[in-house]
Image: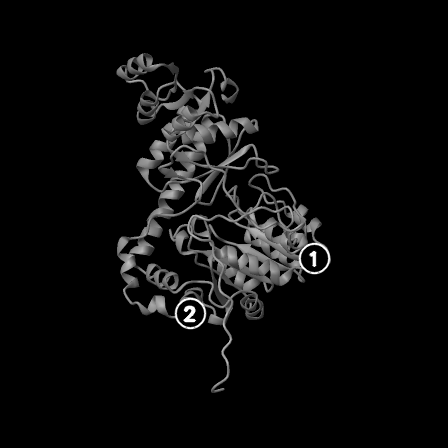
């Protein structure tokens, strides 16, 4: 109103330049998270401190063609809120289903999270054959569901145990095939029997790695099992993990519920555009995917036989990785450390029940990298010799020696050994500045004495 006095806002009382103020007194207690989150920690992969140039711990696929990024020339892609509808329509047509049966999400992880929140609540039960994808029990705990985990340690799926674990309280059954982290598969006929045994449950069929399996029963699952949801991703064989694009396919009412369970714009417009371009039938993306799948299938057999040869117990895999078990947990840790000393990163599972004595490595999808990996496996597990000191290193290399462990205390010789394919092990006091510098040069471990890792020999 004209002539009305204006109210002045209180002036901000900022510290003057150079002035400091005491931190506010923290409250006696902070808000507590919901019960399902208490005691849970965020997902994190334990990694070795040495620099890694061949990462084989994440199961990513081949690099996409650089020309793919030409898709993003239109600034409107960034300006407007995204729509995943074009990608959902493309995927639906590819699968031969209506578009209202497909939901695109920020990776298959988001779709799985939505499914757990949609079909489970506190007091319900979920059946998760174990080991399984690490986030599945996490999602179950967040919603307060009870996890039943029949053991699935090797190739044969525990059908009888899974059927015995289901009851009237079972609202979700998760079937991961090929399984993560073992690579074992679930026969389609088994899926049918499990789903029929619990018609009240949502059957979550995680096919993240199905492209590298011998067969892809997606169409059969969607056409035969009325309570099934199929989860797929572009993060693995398609090589687009950084885009975070996955999708779930199933009955329209179940997909409608999943759509309501999450945010409206979870997948970015650049991700949708790049995914559509990469999936073009017959295009360079599909060509790279098919070449990668062919390479993986050959590499799996070679890695399986190599692991068995050196005393590791591998599982027959149909994924783009191979899983192996050791006689004891310390062997798994040394295997991870030794490969890191040669610049290769793999996944181990410290502290995880049933997995702490195991490891998982991605198939490189490249002949030269596979040769490098196999040479490194043999050097880590069955070294030809233990070499100590720069003079012995030079003599060993002049003789054409390879596949050894090298113990040294100076950074130059450790770097030289790593470059030559010897597993570099630093001799120093652990947890010191020089130890940290040794790790920056790529050592597998820092020990006081060369006998300190004798127990890690397989």
Q: How many numbered tags mark residues here?
A: 2
Relative depth, front residue between 333 and 367: 333
Relative depth, front residue between 221 and 267: 267
Relative depth, front residue between 409 and 139: 409
Q: Secondary structure at mark 1?
A: loop
Let me know if residue 369 appears in the view.
yes
Cα distance, mark 2 to mark 1? 33 Å
**Residue 375 sits in which quadrant?**
top left
Residue 397 on image: x %, y % = 29, 17
Let me know if residue 145 appears in the view.
no
Question: Measured along the vertical axis of the image, is residue 274 above or below residue 299?
Answer: below
Crowd tier of the residue under label 2, counting other residues whose Cα lies within 10 Å: few below 14, some 14–19, many 20 or above? some
Label ID, residue 316:
none
Q: Is residue 153 left or right of residue 123?
A: left
Q: Secondary structure at mark 2?
A: loop
Question: Measured along the vertical axis of the image, is residue 223 above or below residue 325?
Answer: below
- Which residue extends farthest bottom? 2
Residue 170 on image: x %, y % = 69, 56
Residue 21 on image: x %, y % = 52, 49
Q: Is residue 81 left or right of residue 250?
A: left
Residue at point 30%, 36% (across, down): 368
Question: Measured along the vertical axis of the image, is residue 394 above or below residue 360?
Answer: above
Residue 440 on image: x %, y % = 38, 31
Mark 2 and mark 1 lie on one chain; the one further toward the N terminus is: 2
Question: Measured along the vertical axis of the image, is residue 120 above or below residue 347?
Answer: below
Pointer 2 with pointer 1, Cβ within 8 A: no
Crowd tier of the residue under label 1, counting other residues whose Cα lies within 10 Å: few below 14, some 14–19, many 20 or above? few
Question: Label 2: which residue?
Answer: 83
Question: Label 1: which residue?
Answer: 122
Colour scheme employed for the rendering of this structure: one colour
């Amino acid at each position: 109103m004209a002539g009305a006095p204006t109210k002045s806002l209180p002036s901000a009382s900022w510290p003057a330049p150079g002035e400091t103020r005491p931190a506010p007194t923290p409250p006696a207690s902070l808000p507590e998270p919901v019960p399902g989150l208490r005691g849970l920690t965020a997902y994190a992969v334990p990694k070795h401190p040495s620099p890694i140039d061949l990462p084989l711990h994440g199961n990513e696929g081949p690099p996409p063609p650089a020309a793919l990024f030409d898709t993003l020339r239109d600034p409107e892609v960034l300006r407007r809120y995204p729509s995943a509808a074009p990608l959902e329509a493309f995927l639906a047509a590819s699968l031969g289903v209506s578009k209202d049966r497909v939901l695109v999400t920020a990776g298959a992880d988001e779709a799985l999270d939505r499914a757990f929140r949609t079909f489970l609540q506190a007091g319900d039960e979920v059946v998760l054959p174990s080991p399984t994808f690490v986030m599945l029990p996490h999602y179950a705990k967040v919603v307060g569901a009870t996890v039943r985990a029949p053991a699935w340690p090797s190739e044969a799926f525990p059908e009888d145990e899974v059927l015995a674990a289901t009851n009237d309280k079972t609202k979700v059954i998760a079937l991961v095939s090929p399984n993560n982290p073992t690579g074992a598969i679930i026969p389609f006929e088994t899926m049918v029997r499990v789903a029929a045994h619990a018609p009240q449950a949502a059957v979550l069929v995680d096919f993240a790695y199905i492209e590298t399996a011998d067969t892809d029963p997606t169409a059969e699952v969607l056409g035969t099992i009325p309570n099934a949801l199929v989860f797929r991703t572009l993060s693995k064989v398609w090589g687009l993990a950084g885009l975070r694009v996955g999708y779930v396919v199933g009955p329209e009412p179940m997909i409608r519920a999943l759509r309501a369970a999450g945010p409206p714009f979870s997948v970015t417009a650049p991700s949708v555009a790049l995914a559509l371009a990469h999936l073009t039938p017959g295009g360079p993306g599909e060509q790279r995917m098919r070449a990668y799948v062919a390479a993986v299938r050959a590499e799996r057999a070679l890695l399986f036989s190599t692991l068995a040869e050196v005393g590791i117990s591998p599982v027959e895999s149909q994924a783009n990785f191979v899983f192996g078990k050791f006689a004891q947990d310390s062997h798994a840790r040394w295997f991870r450390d030794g490969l890191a000393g040669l610049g290769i990163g793999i996944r181990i599972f410290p502290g995880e029940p049933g997995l702490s004595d195991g490891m998982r490595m991605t198939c490189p999808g490249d002949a030269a990298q596979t040769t490098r990996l196999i040479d490194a496996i043999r050097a880590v597990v069955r070294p030809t010799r233990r070499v100590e000191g720069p003079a012995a290193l030079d003599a060993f290399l002049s003789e054409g020696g390879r596949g050894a462990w090298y113990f040294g205390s100076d950074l130059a010789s450790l770097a030289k050994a790593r470059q030559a394919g010897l597993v570099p092990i630093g001799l120093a006091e652990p947890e010191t500045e020089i130890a940290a510098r040794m790790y920056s040069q790529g050592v597998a471990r820092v020990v006081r004495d060369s006998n300190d890792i004798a127990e890690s020999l397989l």
